[in-house]
Image: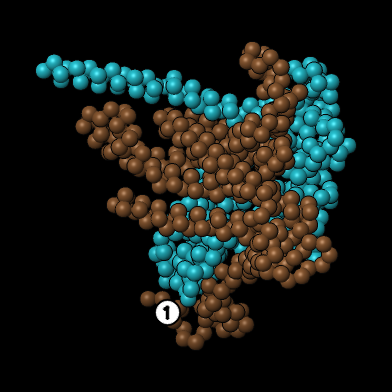
Chain colours: A cyan, B brown
């Protein structure tokens, strides 16, 4: 009897400990810590971007005399505004091409059987798993041969390679969730196959299409490896490359570098804030079998 | 019954040219919808990939190219900095895997405890922001924070009395590696969190109710209900994190440039050094083939063995 009481007592004590671990306070503490870890590097960039060069050297937590001079130096003096324009153009065009090509392809993989269909789909997955760094050297060669170095076209082509397989895969997974009976009903009502796809199934998959678009845009926006390899001047350079090149200077203008970073983070941060749900759906939708 | 659909030879749009085109599209729907993507993938993937194999068989040192199939592959394993890069890549990728998935699990468990959907969305948005930051900017940001003279990390540590004087984090090989792993994890934790949270939310509530009725402690519930159900999400988050960290270029390159003295030079930086900076295409291609082979072997093996076993678990 005494033994049993002891066990119950031990169980209760353990459970109390776990209740404490699981309490609201601990949950919020963990989440505050996570948010602090996420946000503080960006806050430090934000603070630095409002400092003067002397303020950077003085190493204070807050800017002594806040100024937007660093933004002026970065955007105008260094021509960084051109990188902003390039990034917007490259990310938009890449996203448009990838979505227009990838959405119908994903539909086909979700609906039709055809010779070697599995092999073709595995090829698409293989393209996605293939490490992009492996293709950097050939791309550099090809771009040199075709005169595409330092052009926006070169970076768009690289983006198509990087994100088209991903979009095909994500869109296929979204189309699979829509019952095939919908297409069949449309066919019975007299739609051609393409009309069934475009007027009946596509509208239903719009949230998935939005998720794919947002994800592709963000990925193209933040792409560094190919943009860095293919472009070295301001006619085609994207923001991630331009910001990185600030650091290569002998005397780094840290305030201007921070300003450039903030400029590049703002659009993606806004996308995350407004489209959080879609991004989560896209991230997890890209993984379903 | 509608008879329009069965008008014999004539297509759904009637006769004429548009009808013929529309019929052709209808009969070749797969080609029309999938064809453009396959052509595009052929041009942007197959062509460079074949070129990669071809280049790896060329001696491109010095002027011109000569076909010497064994030359570059023979050089790989004799180069001491190659083994250094392999070791760094393993430390880097597994370090990032452990930190990202570990922290991701803790954050996902905490998020899953929140009942209020709005609060949960607010937290996830804030945590997701680091994922959206371009990787090269992650690098310059962490380089700036850990700067020896002007870095905020030294400033905080000195003000807290932990350090007496500034420490140059990025000049020491061990601390430089820790900083790049942290920077890498910083941008990967959101992904691991989202995947694991999705896994947590797919666990049926009945399982928890049953565990409670049986008098299981929180730990037992976690150990025998949560973890087994979470296993598929762990495998997905782990494989993807590892695979992307294994090929990582932007973060180590923009944080340390591979330094000090090659201490954070990953295979991707190594390939970039030979292929783009030294213009030794052949050798860079051969190393690329090695990296691609390792990644694909691991990924395929993982998918086959683990996913096959996972199906047994789920049944």
Task: Specify whether B56 is left or right of A187.
Answer: right
Vertically, is A180 above or below A19?
A: below
Q: Residue A221: image x %, image y %? A: 68, 47
Which residue sits at x=82%, y=45%? A82
Label 1 neighbour load within 10 Å: few <14, some 14-19, many 20+: few
Q: Which residue lies at the image location 31% right of the left edge and 19% below the top edge?
A: A16
Q: Going 50% across and 64% down the picture, which residue do you hit? A: A122
Q: Secondary structure at mark 1?
A: loop
Q: Nearer the viewer, residue A186 or A93?
A: A93
Position in image of residue B5 (x %, y %): 45, 78
Q: Which residue is mark 1?
A: B3
Above or below for B71 versus B23:
above
**Residue A135 visible in the displayed image:** no
In percent of width and height, residue A40 lies at 63, 26
Q: Which chain letter matches label 1? A: B
Q: Is residue B13 above or below residue B201?
A: below
Instruction: Specify whether residue A172 is in view.
Output: yes
Q: Nearer the viewer, residue B143 or A238?
A: B143
Residue placed furthest toward the left = A1
Question: x, y percentage for residue B199?
Answer: 41, 42
How many numbered marks, from 0 up? 1
Q: Residue furthest bottom?
A: B9
User: Which quarter of the picture shows residue A249?
Assistant: top right
**Residue B67 vertical placement versus B283 (above, below):** below
> Is the N terminus of chain B in the top left, top right, bottom left or bottom right quadrant?
bottom left
Please give the name of the residue rendered at 46% of the width and 83% of the height, measured from the top-left corner: B7
Farthest residue to the front: give it.
B78
């Amino acid at each position: 009897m005494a033994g049993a009481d002891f066990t119950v007592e031990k169980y209760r004590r353990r459970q109390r400990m776990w209740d404490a671990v699981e309490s609201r306070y601990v949950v919020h503490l963990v989440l505050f810590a996570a948010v602090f870890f996420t946000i503080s590097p960006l806050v430090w960039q934000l603070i630095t971007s409002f400092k003067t060069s002397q303020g950077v050297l003085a190493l204070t937590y807050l800017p002594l005399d806040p100024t937007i001079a660093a933004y002026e130096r970065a955007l105008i003096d260094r021509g960084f505004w051109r990188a902003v324009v390039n990034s917007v153009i490259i990310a938009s065009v890449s996203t448009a091409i990838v979505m227009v090509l990838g959405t119908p392809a994903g539909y086909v993989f979700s609906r039709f059987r055809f010779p070697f269909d599995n092999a073709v789909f595995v090829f698409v997955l293989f393209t996605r798993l293939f490490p992009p760094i492996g293709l950097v050297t050939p791309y550099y060669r090809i771009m040199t041969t075709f005169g595409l170095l330092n052009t926006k076209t070169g970076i768009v082509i690289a983006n198509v390679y990087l994100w088209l397989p991903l979009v095909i895969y994500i869109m296929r997974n979204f189309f699979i969730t829509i019952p095939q009976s919908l297409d069949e009903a449309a066919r019975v009502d007299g739609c051609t196959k393409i009309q069934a796809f475009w007027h009946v199934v596509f509208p239903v998959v719009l949230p998935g299409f939005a998720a794919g678009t947002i994800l592709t845009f963000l990925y193209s926006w933040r792409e560094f490896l190919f943009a860095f390899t293919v472009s070295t001047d301001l006619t085609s350079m994207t923001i991630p490359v331009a910001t990185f090149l600030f650091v290569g200077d002998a005397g780094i203008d840290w305030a201007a570098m921070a300003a450039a970073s903030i400029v590049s983070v703002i659009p993606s941060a806004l996308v995350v804030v407004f489209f959080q749900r879609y991004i989560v759906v896209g991230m997890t939708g890209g993984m379903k079998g | 019954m509608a008879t329009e659909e069965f008008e014999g030879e004539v297509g759904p749009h009637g006769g004429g040219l548009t009808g013929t085109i529309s019929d052709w599209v209808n009969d070749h729907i797969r080609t029309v919808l999938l064809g453009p993507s396959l052509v595009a993938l052929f041009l942007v993937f197959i062509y460079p990939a074949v070129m990669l194999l071809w280049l790896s068989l060329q001696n491109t040192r010095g002027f011109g190219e000569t076909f010497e199939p064994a030359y570059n592959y023979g050089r790989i394993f004799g180069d001491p900095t190659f083994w250094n890069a392999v070791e760094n890549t393993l430390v880097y990728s597994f370090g990032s895997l452990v930190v990202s998935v570990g922290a991701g699990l803790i954050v996902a468990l905490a998020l899953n405890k929140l009942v209020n959907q709005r609060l949960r969305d607010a937290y996830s948005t804030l945590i997701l922001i680091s994922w959206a930051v371009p990787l090269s900017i992650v690098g310059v940001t962490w380089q700036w924070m850990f700067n020896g003279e002007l870095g905020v990390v030294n400033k905080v540590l000195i003000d807290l009395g932990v350090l007496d004087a500034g420490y140059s984090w990025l000049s020491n090989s061990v601390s430089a590696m820790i900083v790049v792993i942290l920077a890498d994890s910083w941008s990967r934790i959101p992904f691991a969190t989202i995947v694991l949270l999705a896994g947590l939310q797919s666990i049926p509530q009945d399982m928890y109710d049953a565990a409670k009725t049986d008098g299981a402690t929180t730990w037992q519930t976690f150990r025998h209900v949560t973890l087994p159900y979470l296993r598929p999400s762990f495998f997905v988050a782990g494989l993807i994190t590892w695979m992307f960290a294994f090929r990582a270029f932007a973060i180590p390159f923009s944080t340390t440039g591979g330094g000090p003295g090659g201490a954070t030079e990953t295979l991707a930086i190594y390939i970039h050094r030979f292929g783009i900076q030294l213009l030794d295409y052949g050798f860079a291609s051969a190393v690329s083939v090695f990296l691609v082979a390792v990644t694909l072997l691991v990924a395929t093996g993982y998918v086959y063995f683990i996913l096959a076993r996972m199906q047994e678990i789920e049944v």
